[in-house]
Image (spheres, helix red, strand yellow):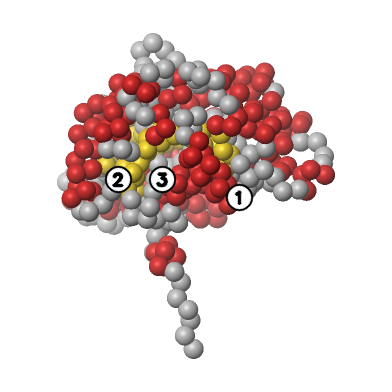
């Protein structure tokens, strides 16, 4: 008897593993809990804002109420009018838009993962390329390629050029290579504030990206998911400026080519509610296309109603965001004090939930020697390689019980880099750093 074959696309997924997600099973089997499992794995890797958890739980409990008959009905797949109105108000209060954002400019999805996939469907034919600067969020390849079958093309950048206008030359070469191979680039995907670097793109760099997009007829998607997690507003750092705030955007690119992403998961600490949104005040055809996909990203009617009610309390939301930013700043300073005291290189950041840092070569050598991977007389000459990085990382998670994703999960061009999430409970952060210290 012959079993029918899966589709070509489905067969490709059978051999596709996302390194960023590899450790999740280990964490689930042995999660840290102060009372019931104090030796468990501390999750200092997932970008989730744990600094405001209790505030959120208390607030949601106070407004959750009882179910209503409308909660039993089909919801608006693109977001209820009340919800989209409150999301528009978030943009108008906090993103300084050049023109007020209207609820009709927004499509709500079940998380930004779905939003990114829908955008890949709407902007690319199978085989079209989406350009992404590295290092970058490690699940983008999955989001863009698994079903939409676009090609997520990472553009390898030296770390010192990641926020420089000089990086445009790397994108020009990438476009040339794609076209010489008979391909077509359709999208440039940016994150500002950046994941994993935790900084905002300077205005001049964004301008050059927009001009690059115009030259090559690209959509430019700017994921601003960490926009309200900027915790350093000092005059000495590059400020975050939403693309929505640019009064002269049309001087550099046709605004209909520009799309903005945002959502609940990061700034609002509500990862589990799975809610993101696509915004484009300039391209109604694109929004209509995303609207047509939105039934594949339904959320429960109750969720939309609860979050609309949550966002409608502007006093609480604004206070929560202020508290979040202060706590993120406090935890960040604890993390970098630790890194600096151990002589570790890190990228100073101003936003987000994490810091990008490089483990010392000595830690790599000592771990490999302890595991019997290198002889004692070979320790001095041991250095970071991609293979060594994975061995050290797995040992750190499974044996030392601290989870941080490896740089390879973010397509880092240099081995030995990791992303430490400091946006966790302050006591857990201290314990994670203590455990890390013991293996350094």
The answer to whether one can see residue 38 in this image is no
As drawn, 133 above or below 370: above
Are the residues flagged by discs 3 and 2 in contact, CB closer than 8 Å? no
Q: What element carries label 3?
A: helix
Task: Return the disc, 1 or 3, that comes first in the chain's sequence.
Answer: 3
How far is mark 3 from mark 2, CA to CA?
Answer: 10 Å
How many neighbours does mark 3 have within 10 angstroms: few (below 14), some (14-19), or many (20 or more)?
some
Give the residue number, with chain letter if any, for mark 3: 123
Out of 322 and 190, give the one closest to the viewer. 190
Whether residue 46 sits left or right of residue 137 in the image: it is right
Out of 273 and 33, give the one closest to the viewer. 273
Residue 39 horizontal/vertical position (percent): 54, 46
Residue 323 horizontal/vertical position (percent): 58, 21
> Quick one: quadrant of the C terminus?
top left
Give the residue number, with chain letter if any, for mark 1: 295
Whether residue 314 sits left or right of residue 237 in the image: it is right
As drawn, 402 above or below 226: below
Residue 381 horizontal/vertical position (percent): 17, 46
Are the residues flagged by discs 1 and 3 in contact, CB closer than 8 Å? no
Q: Residue 185 carries which label?
A: 2
Task: Return the disc, 2 or 1, that comes first in the chain's sequence.
Answer: 2
Tell which residue pokes out farthest to the front in this image: 285
């Amino acid at each position: 008897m012959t079993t029918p074959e899966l589709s070509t696309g489905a067969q490709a997924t059978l051999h596709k593993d996302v390194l960023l997600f590899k450790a999740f099973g280990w964490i689930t089997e042995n999660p840290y809990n102060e009372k019931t499992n104090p030796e468990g794995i501390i999750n200092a890797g997932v970008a989730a804002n744990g600094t405001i958890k209790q505030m959120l739980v208390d607030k949601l409990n106070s407004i959750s109420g009882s179910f209503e008959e409308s909660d039993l009905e089909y919801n608006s797949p693109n977001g209820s009018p009340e919800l989209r109105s409150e999301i528009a108000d978030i943009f108008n209060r906090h993103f300084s838009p050049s023109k007020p954002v209207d609820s009709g400019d927004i499509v709500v999805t079940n998380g930004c993962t779905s939003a990114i996939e829908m955008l890949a469907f709407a902007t690319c034919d199978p085989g079209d390329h989406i350009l992404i600067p590295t290092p970058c969020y490690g699940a983008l390849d999955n989001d863009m390629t698994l079903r939409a079958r676009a090609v997520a093309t990472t553009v390898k950048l030296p770390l010192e050029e990641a926020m420089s206008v000089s990086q445009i030359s790397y994108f020009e070469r990438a476009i040339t290579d794609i076209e010489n191979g008979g391909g077509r680039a359709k999208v440039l995907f940016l994150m500002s504030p950046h994941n994993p670097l935790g900084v905002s793109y300077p205005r001049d760099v964004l301008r050059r990206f927009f001009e690059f997009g115009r030259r090559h007829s690209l959509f430019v998607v700017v994921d601003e998911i960490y926009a309200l997690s900027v915790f350093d507003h000092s005059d000495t750092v590059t400020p975050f400026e939403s693309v929505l705030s640019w009064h002269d955007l049309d001087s550099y690119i046709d605004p209909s080519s520009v799309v903005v992403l945002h959502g609940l998961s990061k700034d609002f600490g509500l990862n589990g509610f799975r809610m993101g949104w696509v915004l484009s005040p300039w391209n109604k055809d694109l929004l209509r296309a995303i609207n047509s996909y939105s039934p594949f990203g339904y959320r429960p009617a109750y969720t939309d109603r609860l979050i609309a009610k949550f966002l409608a309390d502007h006093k609480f939301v604004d206070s929560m965001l202020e508290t979040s930013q202060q706590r993120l700043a406090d935890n960040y300073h604890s993390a970098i004090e630790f890194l600096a005291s151990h002589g570790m290189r890190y990228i100073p950041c101003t936003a987000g939930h994490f810091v990008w840092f490089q483990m010392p070569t000595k830690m790599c050598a000592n771990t490999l020697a302890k595991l019997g991977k290198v002889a004692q007389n070979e320790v001095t000459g041991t250095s970071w390689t991609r293979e060594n990085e994975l061995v050290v990382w797995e040992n750190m998670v499974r044996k030392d019980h601290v989870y941080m994703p490896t740089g390879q999960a973010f397509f880092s061009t240099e081995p030995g880099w990791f992303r430490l999430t400091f946006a966790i409970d302050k006591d857990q952060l201290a314990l994670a750093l203590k455990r890390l210290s013991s293996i350094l």
